[in-house]
């Protein structure tokens, strides 16, 4: 079904109202999961024998282009493609190339991708050619055996080679590291030193209770407030107002000269400045990562070729964007607070 998009797909989606939520926040950042499939099986993200969605439920590349373009027409300035692993979707480069037309017109300021890095040695120069300048690469360890243990199916060498190819192609890399208690916590400082020495920013992420996995999440949870104070014993960190449009709060580490970000949905509420919404690979719009309320955009998308129904559904949904979320890993029931997986909503 995923034939390459023809380059004349050009739905501008212009001329509709901007998206302002009930709390006066303008929605300018869209994350789109382009697939729920992945070539890794990270322990905190998926069960090893994941059941993926039937293909007909997943938006086609044409539908994804139409949907993204409608959001750009409504004021989205930053678009991040994620997954699952976005770069393993068949013909994904034709979607990326097509979306790059919005960079050329200036309607979109940034097109970017979150990836596990497995395809970067193959795709980096094409990504650069499509106007992509920054990538988030998820990497939780520099130890090959631990990498295998965390990702189950991944190979560290391939990812490191991909990061090098991307850097050589001119792409700026940010490393995303999920902090896992007792698994990679002793690697946080060495990873930061490695990242900064190679010119990469690094962001630490707390595990979030999204979806059933094989293990117990309360065992993995490591509060970043603790990590931060440990780093502070060895390094001087200065809070900086650096913003990438995402939820990370950044410090500059004096000794390394690099930036370190903290994404702390569990210990700190970052909702007050939230400018983001997310779309799953089936076209469900989530107004908040931490809540179950969503709007189905696939039905209006498939109901007609014009965008009137789609735009009306988007407006109605943005009118319901909640003020904030309330994540908890419930120690009593050990149930995830939100039942869908990160690979469905995208990170
Ligand atoms: N496959 C790509 C990757 O790994 O970068 C993109 C999708 S992945 C779901 C996006 C990000 O979410 C990754 O940085 C991953 O480490 C993070 N992630 C996945 N499950 C998570 C969880 N339960 N808690 C916190 N972060 C999670
Ligand atoms: Fe795949 Fe990314 Fe989830 Fe790992 S975190 S299983 S690479 S989607």
Image (cartoon, grey):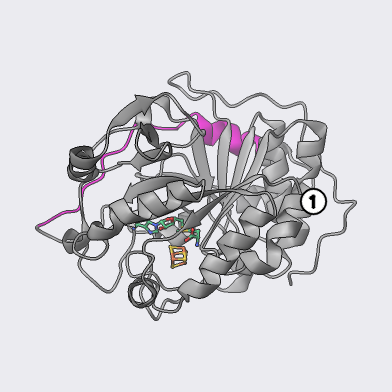
Residue 297 in magenta? no
Look at 69% across and 35% down and name the residue there: 72
Q: Mark 1 points at which residue?
A: 98
Look at 73% across and 51% down and name the residue there: 128
* Disc 1 within 8 angstroms of ligand 1 (CB): no
Position of residue 201 measured from the top left corner of the image (x, y, whole percent): 47, 44
Nearer the observer, 91 or 23: 91
Q: How crowded is mark 1: few (under 14 residues within 10 Å), some or many (20 or more)?
A: many
**In the displayed structure, does residue 312 sit left or right of residue 275?**
right
Q: Is residue 157 above or below residue 194?
A: below
Position of residue 347 measured from the top left corner of the image (x, y, whole percent): 46, 52
Q: Can residue 89 be seen in this view?
A: no
Q: In this view, does 157 lie above or below 305?
A: below
Look at 54% across and 29% down and name the residue there: 27
User: Disc count in the image?
Assistant: 1
Q: Can residue 283 be seen in this view?
A: yes
Q: In which quarter of the image is the N terminus?
A: bottom right
Nearer the observer, 190 or 94: 190
Q: Quadrant of residue 45?
A: bottom left
Which residue appears farthest toward the front when viewing the image? 255
Residue 314 in magenta? yes
Position of residue 149 measured from the top left corner of the image (x, y, whole percent): 33, 76
Which SS class for mark 1? Answer: helix
**In the displayed structure, does residue 332 sit left or right of residue 301?**
left
Numbered range of the magenta stretch: 311-331
């Amino acid at each position: 079904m995923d034939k390459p998009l023809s380059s004349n797909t050009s739905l501008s989606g212009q001329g509709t109202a901007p998206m302002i939520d009930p709390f006066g926040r303008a929605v300018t950042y869209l994350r789109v999961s382009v697939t729920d499939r992945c070539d890794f099986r990270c322990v905190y993200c998926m069960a090893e024998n994941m059941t993926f969605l039937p293909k007909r439920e997943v938006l086609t590349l044409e539908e994804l282009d139409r949907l993204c373009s409608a959001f750009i027409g409504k004021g989205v300035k930053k678009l991040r493609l994620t997954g699952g692993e976005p770069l393993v979707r068949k013909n994904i480069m034709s979607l990326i190339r097509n979306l790059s037309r919005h960079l050329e017109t200036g309607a979109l300021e940034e097109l970017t991708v979150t990836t596990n890095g497995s395809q970067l040695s193959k795709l980096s120069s094409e990504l650069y050619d499509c106007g992509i300048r920054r990538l988030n690469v998820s990497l939780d360890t520099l130890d090959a055996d631990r990498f295998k243990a965390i990702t189950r199916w991944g190979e560290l060498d391939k990812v490191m080679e991909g990061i090098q190819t991307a850097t050589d192609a001119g792409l700026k890399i940010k490393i995303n590291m999920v902090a896992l208690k007792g698994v990679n916590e002793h690697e946080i400082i060495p990873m930061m030193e490695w990242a900064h020495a190679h010119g990469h920013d690094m962001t630490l992420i707390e595990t979030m209770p999204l979806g059933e996995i094989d293990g117990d999440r309360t065992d993995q949870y490591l509060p970043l407030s603790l990590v931060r104070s440990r780093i502070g014993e060895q390094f001087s960190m200065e809070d900086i107002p650096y913003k990438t449009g995402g939820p990370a709060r950044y410090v500059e580490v004096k000794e390394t000269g690099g930036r370190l970000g903290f994404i702390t949905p569990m210990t700190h509420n970052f909702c007050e400045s939230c400018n983001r919404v997310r779309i799953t690979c089936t076209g469900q719009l989530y107004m908040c990562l931490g809540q179950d309320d969503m709007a189905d955009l696939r039905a209006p998308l498939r109901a007609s070729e014009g965008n009137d129904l789609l735009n009306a559904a988007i407006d109605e949904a943005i009118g319901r964007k909640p003020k904030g979320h309330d994540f908890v890993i419930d120690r009593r029931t050990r149930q995830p607070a939100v039942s869908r997986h990160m690979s469905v909503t995208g990170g």
